[in-house]
Image: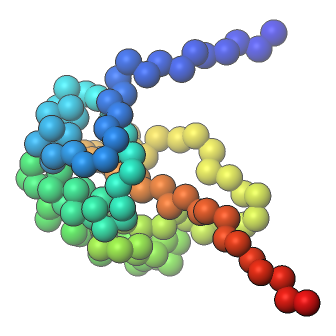
Amino acid sequence: MLDVIEEDRSRLLTIDGEASAASIAAALRGDLVVLIRNVTSDGAEGLIRDVAEQFDLVERLELQAGFAGFLGHRHPIGEYFMSVNVRGDYEFISPHSEGSGFLGIQLAAFYDFTTRPTAVKRSR
């Protein structure tokens, strides 16, 4: 029999739309995961910088963003976000941790570029 682990959302704070860096930082200090929905990629760029500033991590954010494409596995998308490692068709990202005690990651942020179907007009 397969054991199923129930999803626990007790440490998740979901914000729809605009959010202040101070309120996000307060939630992160409370050990919550913060999910912000309906934010443009440009809005997310400014927000991640503002949140990093709340933790005095702007210099590290800029360093990591600059290092993104160094080995060619990833490439910058915008100012602070980067692509995931290159994958082939149907090659999925398996569940994993972005950090460990050894790596010392202090802040991780992800932006989901959801693709929308595009209408295609067929020529006759």
Q: Quadrant of the N terminus?
A: top right
Most distant residue in the front direction: 124
Q: Quadrant of residue 12?
A: top left
Q: Residue at x 31, y 38 (%)?
A: 15
- Residue 45: image x %, image y %? 28, 64
Q: Residue at x 63, y 45 (%)?
A: 94
Colour scheme: rainbow
Compared with 2, 49 (above or below) is below
Mark count: 0
Q: Is residue 119 at least partly visible in the picture? A: yes
Q: Quadrant of the C terminus?
A: bottom right
- Camera-side residue: 78 or 70? 78
Compared with 27, 5 (above or below) is above
- Residue 3: image x %, image y %? 70, 12
Q: Residue at x 52, y 72 (%)?
A: 73
Judge left or right: residue 117 versus residue 45: right
Q: Is residue 61 at least partly visible in the picture? A: no
Q: Residue at x 42, y 67 (%)?
A: 82
- Residue 123: image x %, image y %? 85, 89
Compared with 116, 106 (above or below) is above
Q: Quadrant of residue 9?
A: top left
